[in-house]
Image (cartoon, rainbow, N blue to C red):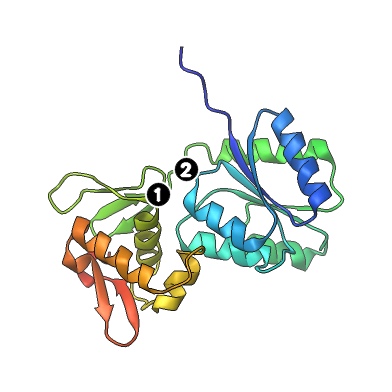
Amino acid sequence: MNQIAPPRVLVVEDDDELRGMLVELLADEAYEVEAAPDGHRALHLGLTRHYDVIVLDRRLPALDGLDVMVRLRRRGVGTPVLVLSAAATASDRVTGLDAGAEDYLTKPFDVDELLARLRALRRRHLDTARTVPVGDALLDLDARELAPGPDGQPVVLSARECDLLATLAARPGQVFSRDELLYSVFTEAEKPVVVDTYVHYLRRKLGRTVVETVRGRGYRLGRGSQP
């Protein structure tokens, strides 16, 4: 008999004690838990790994929690997010929800309420697919697969190829500089040449026109691949 995989949760919290408590609590509730102490690590994990839900602290070092969420949403990541924050005013909650959060819980919080809200988020988003349109094709962000490909068959991409294509496809008319793509896609790389390398990989798999070079400015989704 096949076993049902446990739900996966990403906990993003800069307070070591609270982060450890949340990891232990959710592990006891049969979640598979990963944790990030800052916004940059959270963005990297959110873009490269699949989670059923994200618990996101609003105030984070390096990159604010709401900024992390906005970048994930722009990249087509639809993982439900529950924001934890000490900011408790109505305007704070509205800002968080407008930024893309599905739920907002203020600190200090009741543990049972947190768990109930996470269960509700998982139920509401259980059947939500993560796909991004690329022209007449769809990019499946979980399977890392573009279907149909140039020859009519699905094309499987690497994690970085998928991230790069999803970034370009999420805003098809925008020209991205190499530095912008380096910062948002290749968060652990140091030199923009890695962007050129992965553009070459995408073109090799999907055809020369999938990514357009805008001389002196950067790259954008090829016009023939735009919706």
Pointer 1 or 2: first along the chain: 2
Q: Is residue 112 above or below residue 108?
A: above
Apparent side of residue 152 relative to residue 48 in the rendered image (left or right):
left
Residue lying at the far right of the rendered structure:
108
Q: Position of residue 117 (x, y in %)?
A: 71, 41
Q: What's the residue at 63%, 56% (across, down)?
A: 101
Q: Position of residue 52 (x, y in %)?
A: 56, 41
Q: Which residue is mark 2?
A: 128
Tell me the element at label 2. Answer: loop
Tell me the element at label 1. Answer: loop
Q: Is residue 62 above or below residue 69?
A: below
Q: Residues within 10 Å of mark 2 (few under 14, many from 20)?
A: few
In front here: 191 or 170? Answer: 191
Residue lying at the far top of the rendered structure:
1
Mark number displayed over residue 152: none
Looking at the rendered structure, the kind of residue marked 1 is Leu
Q: Are dots 1 and 2 in contact, CB under 8 Å?
A: no
Q: Which residue is mark 1?
A: 141
Q: Position of residue 186 (x, y in %)?
A: 46, 64
Q: Is residue 13 above or below residue 90?
A: above
Looking at the rendered structure, the kind of residue marked 2 is Thr
Examine the rendering and report whether any part of residue 100 can be seen.
no
Quarter of the figure with residue 202: bottom left
